[in-house]
Amino acid sequence: MSIKKLGPEELLALDKFSVDEGNPHIVVDKKICATCTSQVCVIVCPARCYRLKDGAVNFEYAGCLECGTCRVMCTEKGITSWKYPRATFGVTFRCS
């Protein structure tokens, strides 16, 4: 019996997300993010919720793993609100 080592994309595909539409658990101030020069959130987010598009940081909370890395690493205070999703919403980690 051999065990297959899964890559990050395959592991993320195992997770189940229940998105609370219209009620994001993370709020990002786009004006602050527009002036940020480090854009560290793009690098550190393991779920790649932060992406660069035309030089600006775009954020999508739907695939968030709720790890808090973005909140800790944001030096410009661009994340104006970070809380865990309401009950029954957010990520559910599953094993293969």
Image (spheres, helix red, strand yellow):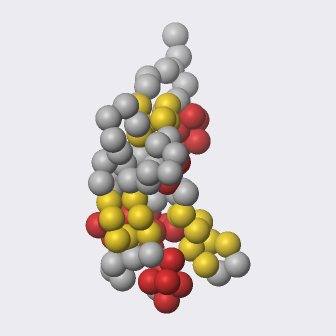
Residue 80 position within the rendered picture, expressed as x and y whole percent measured from the top left: 34, 71
**Numbered disc total:** 0
Residue 37 position within the rendered picture, expressed as x and y whole percent measured from the top left: 49, 87
Residue 7 appearing in the image:
no
Q: Which residue is more in the foreground, 82 or 15?
A: 82
Residue positioned 44% across, 51% down in the render: 23
Residue 22 appearing in the image:
yes
Residue positioned 37% across, 70% down in the render: 79
Q: Quadrant of residue 94?
A: top left
Residue 18 position within the rendered picture, expressed as x and y whole percent measured from the top left: 48, 35
In the depicted structure, whether residue 94 falls above or below residue 58: above
Q: Which residue is more in the foreground, 24 or 7?
A: 24
Q: Which residue is more in the foreground, 32 or 41?
A: 32
Residue furthest out toward the top: 1
Residue positioned 44% across, 23% down in the render: 95
Would residue 96 appear left or right of 56 to someone viewing this image? Answer: left
Residue positioned 50% across, 41% down in the render: 19
